[in-house]
Image (tube, helix red, strand yellow):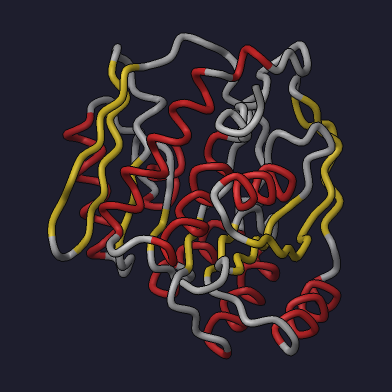
């Protein structure tokens, strides 16, 4: 592109800066995209957990979206925390009215700390978003929740579930294998065209707050700058692996600390 791509994140806020809107904007900046944002919820949150969620009224989320796209050309969209069924349906209507070439859906349901971030009645609404996204990026428990099945315990089981999501209407699925046991992280990209797999050595650290937000944002930032989803996924996962590996340099919080979004920029 002759200019930096403009990426939009539709997500919730994290006061500790490691996840949500804050992580998305850091990721966009680290990877060469200009970040814009529409806030869906405020959270009372730290590296130790979530103590409260305040959902932004859907009418105001709609106003944010309509005001933004009336002025700014968006090249890629990342969708994160939606919190309620009404919010998910609102975003679905927005995507139908304003089709984008790149839409990355991170079906945020559970925080790294284990806190639930999505109402039970919102899961079905998120399922309705699957055909509207270029790629969906669920982790192991989120994949199971989307299909209403037991969690996968191996890469092969997870791959089978990813294929079910494609059959159910998803255009493509990036299955994140971080919750599986083993010395190697296995991420699998599944679409009607086939499957490819990315492997990384597992980093032994608890500083993984916001990894899902950051990876989905990396995909949105990089896809307009890459020739294919395979190249995008390999570069995004490679960047995140290094951000996790360098996370101990930050010393932020006493719980699940954030990844180092600017590892390539800060000494």
| For residue 63, above or below residue 246 | below
- Residue name at image x 29 percent, y 14 percent: 182
Work out which residue is located at the far left of the displayed protein and give it.
194
The quarter holding residue 153 reads top left
User: What is the tally of numbered marks visible in this picture?
Assistant: 0
The quarter holding residue 193 reads bottom left
- Residue name at image x 69 percent, y 70 percent: 86
The quarter holding residue 201 reads top left
Left or right for 156, reference 60: left
| For residue 223, above or below residue 260 | below
Left or right for 200, reference 19: left
Left or right for 43, reference 125: right
* Residue 42 screen position, x and y as percent: 84, 49
- Residue name at image x 37 percent, y 44 percent: 235
Left or right for 212, reference 65: left
| For residue 225, above or below residue 132 | above
* Residue 119 screen position, x and y as percent: 66, 51
- Residue name at image x 45 percent, y 70 percent: 102
Of residues 39 and 167, the one nearer the viewer is 39
In the rendered image, which quarter contains the C terminus?
Answer: top right
Of residues 119 and 184, the one nearer the viewer is 184
* Residue 46 screen position, x and y as percent: 80, 27
């Amino acid at each position: 592109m002759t200019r930096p791509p403009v990426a939009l994140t539709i997500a919730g806020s994290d006061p500790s800066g490691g996840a949500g809107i804050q992580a998305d904007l850091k990721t966009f900046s680290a990877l060469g995209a200009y970040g814009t944002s529409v806030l869906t919820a405020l959270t009372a949150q730290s590296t130790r957990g979530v103590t409260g969620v305040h959902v932004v009224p859907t009418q105001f989320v709609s106003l944010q979206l309509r005001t933004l796209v009336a002025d700014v050309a968006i090249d890629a969209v990342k969708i994160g925390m939606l919190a309620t069924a009404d919010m998910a349906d609102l975003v679905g209507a927005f995507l139908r009215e304003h089709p984008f070439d790149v839409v990355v859906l991170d079906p945020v349901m559970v925080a790294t700390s284990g806190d639930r971030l999505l109402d039970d009645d919102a899961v079905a609404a998120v399922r309705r978003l699957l055909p509207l996204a270029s790629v969906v990026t669920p982790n192991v428990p989120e994949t199971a929740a989307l299909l209403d099945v037991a969690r996968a315990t191996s890469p092969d089981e997870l791959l089978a579930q990813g294929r079910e999501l494609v059959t159910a209407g998803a255009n493509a699925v990036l299955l994140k294998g971080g919750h599986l046991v083993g010395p190697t992280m296995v991420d699998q990209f599944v679409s009607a065209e086939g499957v490819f797999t990315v492997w990384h050595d597992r980093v032994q650290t608890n500083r993984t707050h916001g990894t899902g937000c950051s990876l989905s944002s990396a995909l949105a930032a990089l896809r307009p700058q890459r020739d294919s989803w395979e190249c995008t996924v390999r570069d995004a996962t490679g960047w995140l692996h290094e951000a996790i590996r360098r996370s101990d340099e930050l010393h932020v919080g006493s719980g699940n600390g954030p990844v180092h979004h600017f590892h390539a920029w800060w000494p």
